[in-house]
Image (spheres, rainbow, N blue to C red):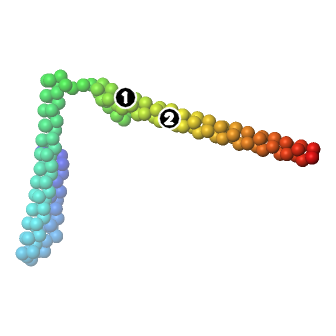
Amino acid sequence: MSDYAQINNNRSAAADYTAKKNAPKSGGGFDDVLKTQADKSAQTGAENAESTQDADYRTQLQEHMEEMADRIRHGTIQPKIRIGAQEYTQEEWKKMLEKFDDAEETLQEQIKEEIENLKEQAEKEELARQIAAEKKMRAGEEKAVDSAASYML
């Protein structure tokens, strides 16, 4: 019997003793009998639920053990290497690195495109400044020619 079951048995025995001790001395009533039976059935139900849960854990553990034995027999088990809080097999590690490399390449392409767009935009702005400067210079030359022409007249 497990320690947990032994503790529950001790508790139930103590509860029965307490119930008998506190029971009325006058032969007891029907309510007391029902209450005692309800307490016993509740304890039995809890023990049954625990045993069912234990059986579920046992079956899960047994299935896992069988799965591991099959992997060992077929040679499909791979050693895992702990990296931080994660564990990776060599195959899982390669897949993760491939995903990382793909993401890095995509990021580099996006950065190159952004740099090209910024260069084109800067070239357009520079060309617009040059055109504006030439217009100002021509306008200034025309004023100078007009003022010189009006001075001569």
Q: Is residue 69 left or right of residue 150?
A: left
Name above or below for residue 17 compared with residue 26.
Answer: above
Residue that label 2 marks: 113
Secondary structure found at label 1: helix
Residue that label 1 marks: 97
Q: Amino acid at mark 1?
A: Leu
Name above or below for residue 55 compared with residue 28.
Answer: above
- The crowding category of the residue bearing disc 2, from other C-alpha atoms within 10 Å (few below 14, some 14 to 19, many at least 20), is few
Q: Amino acid at mark 2?
A: Glu
Q: Is residue 95 left or right of residue 26?
A: right
Regarding residue 142, the answer to whether it shows in the image is yes
Q: Residue at x 14, y 24 (%)?
A: 73
Name above or below for residue 135 compared with residue 69.
Answer: below
Residue 24 image-quadrant placement? bottom left
Name above or below for residue 104 compared with residue 46.
Answer: above
Q: Residue at x 77, y 41 (%)?
A: 138
Camera-nearest label, 1 or 2 = 2
* Residue placed furthest toward the front: 153
Could you tell me how far apart the alpha carbons at marks 1 and 2 are, in whole angstroms? 24 Å
Split into 4 quadrants, where in the image is the N terminus? top left
Q: Is residue 121 left or right of residue 38?
A: right
Instruction: Say which mark, if any, is on residue 31.
Output: none
Q: Residue at x 37, y 28 (%)?
A: 97
Residue 106 image-quadrant placement? top left
Residue 63: x and y in percent read 13, 37
Q: Residue at x 13, y 37 (%)?
A: 62
Report the front residue among 103 and 151.
151
Residue 13 image-quadrant placement? bottom left
Secondary structure found at label 2: helix
